[in-house]
Image (cartoon, rainbow, N blue to C red):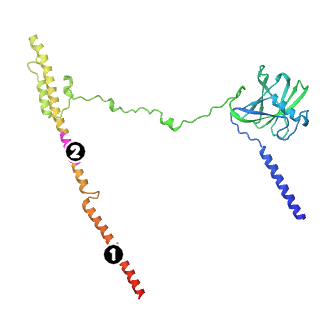
């Protein structure tokens, strides 16, 4: 009996230790808020939300009335701010300020009933709504706030506790004070691909002047290239450049005036002759190139239809393949017939 009793005591002690450990883990604060401004739900408590302690002079007998009074004195929303350095600030709003005097705040950082006084600053007052906002710095958003204030109609101090939860980005009707650091963004691959390319230093082909088949101006006749024999062009140009009767200065001024148009007309005729000679030669070269292409196409087509990639005839290859297939089929048929005959003979011997 003593052995069984000791085992039961040990089991109960183990279960108790596990429950205490689980309770402690549940109340470990976790700061999950980053730099930002959050609108939170503010919850008033007449007794300490973790230890259950009541500091108000009304005591346990005034628990229901005290809870109702704290809910009337505290606004149901609060502002939580976290600056870029990680400092956290909580702003609470007290109602019925015409009946409240000298509110003071303290913070329970460890959530075990041990409070430390904290200074508060008034952010705004609304005389119409009869409210005042008080802002204080805390370690994180999981702390428990303690508010002690003098209530004029009751003629005594009242003590209650405040917690915040349900954080959403925004500030509602509160006044924010912290800055939000803008994140540094790296350019994405799509933005990099959309950047304009550097202009190429090489000249574009589109910038080349268009080529025309018109006859060149008389001043540029000496630089024109022609596919005609050079002897014909040079002979004509030499004839035009030879000093003749028209090029020599004449004593008669009327004759010298008539000689100038003669030189220009000769040069223009030489340019027309050059263009005329070049056109048939270009047409003949285009005709010859088209004939060569047609002959190469026909040769390639014939080679594809008559030979495979190894150079053997396509017809012979297909015939050899068909013959090999028929040989394999014949061997398979002969083997099957041999096996059937062997089985029949074996059964006949067994019957005898």
**Residue drawn at (13%, 24%), measured in percent from left and top?**
269
Between residue 180 and residue 111, name the one nearer to us.
111
Between residue 232 and residue 300, name the one nearer to us.
300
Tag in front: 1 or 2: 1
- What percent of the width, then of the height, locates residue 139? 77, 36
- What percent of the width, then of the height, locates residue 201? 39, 32
Seen in the picture, residue 12 relative to 72 is either above or below; the reply is below
Determine whether the residue tagged by mark 2 lies in a helix, strand or loop: helix
Q: Are marks 1 and 2 in contact (CB under 8 Å)?
A: no
Question: Main SS of the magenta segment?
Answer: helix
Residue 334: which disc? 1
**Residue drawn at (12%, 28%), measured in percent from left and top?**
236
Q: Residue 55 sits in which quadrant?
A: top right
* Residue picked out by circle 2: 293
> For the C terminus, which image quadrant?
bottom left
Q: Which residues are magenta?
A: 287-297
Q: Residue 230 sits in which quadrant?
A: top left
């Amino acid at each position: 009996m003593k052995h069984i009793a000791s085992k039961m005591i040990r089991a109960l002690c183990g279960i108790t230790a596990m429950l205490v450990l689980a309770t402690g883990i549940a109340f470990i604060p976790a700061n999950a808020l980053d730099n930002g401004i959050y609108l939170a739900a503010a919850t008033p408590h007449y007794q300490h939300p973790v230890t259950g302690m009541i500091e108000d002079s009304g005591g346990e007998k005034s628990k229901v009335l005290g809870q109702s009074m704290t809910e009337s004195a505290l606004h149901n929303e609060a502002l939580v701010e976290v600056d870029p350095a990680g400092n956290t600030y909580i702003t609470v709003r007290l109602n019925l300020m015409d009946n409240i005097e000298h509110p003071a705040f303290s913070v329970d950082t460890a959530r075990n009933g041990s409070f430390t006084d904290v200074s508060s600053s008034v952010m705004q007052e609304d005389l119409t709504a009869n409210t005042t906002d008080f802002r204080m710095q805390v370690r994180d958003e999981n702390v428990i706030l303690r508010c002690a204030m003098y209530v004029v109609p009751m003629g005594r101090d009242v003590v209650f506790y405040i917690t915040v939860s349900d954080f959403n980005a925004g500030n509602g009707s509160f006044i924010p004070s912290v800055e939000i650091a803008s994140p540094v963004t790296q350019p994405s691959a799509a933005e990099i691909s959309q950047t304009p390319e550097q202009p190429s230093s090489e000249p574009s082909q589109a910038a080349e002047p268009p080529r025309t088949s018109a006859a060149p101006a008389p001043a540029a006749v000496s630089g024109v290239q022609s596919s005609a024999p050079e002897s014909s062009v040079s002979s004509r140009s030499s004839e035009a450049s030879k000093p003749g009767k028209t090029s020599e200065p004449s004593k008669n001024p009327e004759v010298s005036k008539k000689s100038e148009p003669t030189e220009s007309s000769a040069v223009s005729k030489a340019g027309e002759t050059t263009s005329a000679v070049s056109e048939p030669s270009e047409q003949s070269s285009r005709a010859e190139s088209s004939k060569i292409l047609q002959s190469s196409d026909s040769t390639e087509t014939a080679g594809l239809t008559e030979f495979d990639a190894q150079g053997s005839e396509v017809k012979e290859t297909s015939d050899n393949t068909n013959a090999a297939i028929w040989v394999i089929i014949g061997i398979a048929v002969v083997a099957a017939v041999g096996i059937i005959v062997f089985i029949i003979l074996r059964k006949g011997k067994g019957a005898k």
